[in-house]
Amino acid sequence: MNLLFLIIIFTALGGVLSVLAASVFLLLSDTVRAKVLPHGVSFATGALLAVAFWGLIPHAIEEVGVAEVQSLSGSIMLGLLMFFILEKLLIWRHCHSGSCEVHGEMDDHSHAHGAHKSAGTMIIIGDSIHNFVDGVLIAAAFLTDVQLGIVTSLAVAAHEIPQEVGDFAILLHSGYSKAKALFYNILASLTTVVGGILAYYSLGDLHDSLPYFLALAASSFIYIAVADLIPTLHKKTDIKTSLQQIALIFAGVGLIILLHGIAHDMHLESPDIAEQVDVEPSPIL
């Protein structure tokens, strides 16, 4: 079977399958989902931070080596500033007034609505970048060995499920309908296929840029967690809710670390995968 065809099929499975598995969250009744949603935001906070600090940033550092760590750190910093500017523009777009914060309760609500909407937009952007990188990694594994490619794509799907659940929670919290949340998550997951196809044809060039894609994805996840989700969690300060939030944040961190370890054992994030590829892409049949 043609290698490009396999890469397309399994990158689609690696991205879309995880979204469909996580979409079970949407099947809950409105009442149950309203109770679960705040807990999902707490869980998503931990998951996003863990993906950034335990997975993306260490992998990017391994790729660039010690000599370029400063430039990689600068990329993360610039990414954070870029997402701040992007969110500011999105809030202004939803605000429809010169200075929302000084126009009373209605404009406060408009400003808050804009902030929630911007969090949803940014999670879609960040997830698209992350999925693109996953596609590159899956294609690199297939170009090394077909069996390794299949295992890697399945590991990507398993690794993404808890993060996709968190993404659904963030999108619903941001005011998206169930249908729109599912549509945009599936759309973002298809960038896995784009990454796989581009890697098939130009893996060498993409491999040089891969650490900076990872850094950009990490900065988006860090910004969303710290600037958008954590302030939301601080709105409830009673002891019981605070302890639940802390427990769920650590649960999100722990699950990502556990799945990351499993994926690492399956060579999902081996920094040598792309370097081992020395074969030319096979022609399309």
Image (cartoon, rainbow, N blue to C red):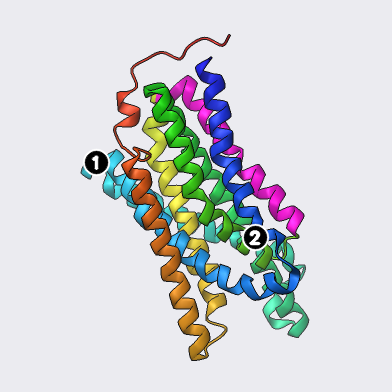
Crowd tier of the residue under label 1, counting other residues whose Cα lies within 10 Å: few below 14, some 14–19, many 20 or above: few
The reply, left or right, for residue 161 in relation to residue 274 is: right
- Which residue lies under the disc numbered 1? 65
The residue lying at 41 percent from left, 13 percent from top is 280
User: 100 or 232, which lies in front?
Assistant: 232
Q: Amino acid at mark 1?
A: Gly
The residue lying at 38 percent from left, 39 percent from top is 268
Magenta region includes residue 121: no
- Which residue lies under the disc numbered 2? 25
Q: Earlier in the sequence, mark 1 or mark 2?
A: 2
Q: Which residues are magenta?
A: 178-203
Q: Residue 48 placed where, x, y %?
A: 47, 59
231, above or below 211, in the image: below
147, above or below 131, in the image: above
Find residue 23 and report its image quarter: bottom right
Magenta region includes residue 195: yes
Residue 240 appears in the rendering: yes
Q: Main secondary structure of the magenta part?
A: helix
Q: Residue 232 placed where, x, y %?
A: 57, 76
123, above or below 137, in the image: below
Mark 1–mark 2 Cα distance, whole angstroms, equals: 40 Å
Q: Residue 125 placed where, x, y %?
A: 58, 49
Crowd tier of the residue under label 2, counting other residues whose Cα lies within 10 Å: few below 14, some 14–19, many 20 or above: some
Circle 1 SS class: loop
